[in-house]
Amino acid sequence: MEILQNVDKLLYMAQDNMVLSIISGFFLAYIESFIPMIPILVIGAANGAINGLFLGFAITWLGSCAGAFSVFLILKHLMNRSFFTKLMDKNNKFNKMIAKVKKSDFKFLLLFYTLPFLPSSLTTLAAAYCKIDVKRFLPPMVAGKFMILSCQDICYTYERVFQNTC
């Protein structure tokens, strides 16, 4: 909960400075890929409230896609190490997810990237573990991250309603 308050404070300070709001919004969405405890919906809602619906969406979407792609490349490189292979083989839930990814990778990745309540880092981890090619990873990840727009639109609309009634 303290993390969310700090995110709100940072974006509130950035409200007066356009460049700072863009950089901090992008950076927070990028970091969310590495630290899944920060919900992308909160970052997207704050970006939408500060920068407007479409600019806020673009900042959040680009940061989230860049972060997920960075995590994918790092994990794909690390999966060649024997330590990680042994660690992943012991986890039954993860093995079930891996089987689904190998069977139908595009549909699976697109579905799980569009569900905002699932951590996208787990989906990225599964894709890296399956050694999915970058060309097959990018399209469903980029398309799946568009769910940020729908969630951000809801938050943006509610904010405008509250501004008009107060």
Image: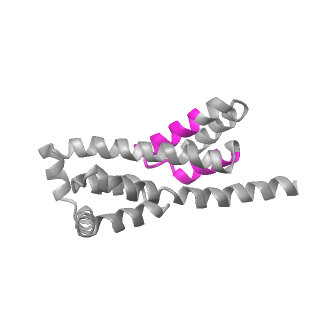
- Which residue is rendered at x = 47% and y = 64% of the image? 115
Q: Position of residue 38 (x, y in %)?
A: 50, 47
Q: In this picture, is 106 found above or below 61?
A: below
Furthest residue toward front: 135
Residue 162 shows in the view = yes
Q: What residue range appears in magenta?
A: 23-49
Q: In this picture, is 47 found above or below 141?
A: above
- Which residue is rendered at x = 53% and y = 39% of the image? 26
Q: Position of residue 104 (x, y in %)?
A: 28, 69
- Which residue is rendered at x = 62% and y = 46% of the image? 56
As rendered, which of 8 and 73 lies closer to the eye?
73
Q: Position of residue 9 (x, y in %)?
A: 65, 37
Asked if residue 162 lies left or right of residue 39, the reply is right
As rendered, which of 162 and 91 lies closer to the eye?
162
As rendered, which of 84 and 19 lies closer to the eye?
19
- Residue 41 in the magenta stretch? The answer is yes
Residue 125 shows in the view = no
Q: Position of residue 87 (x, y in %)?
A: 18, 51
- Residue 19 in the magenta stretch? The answer is no
Q: Quadrant of residue 35?
A: top left
Asked if residue 165 lies left or right of residue 141, the reply is right
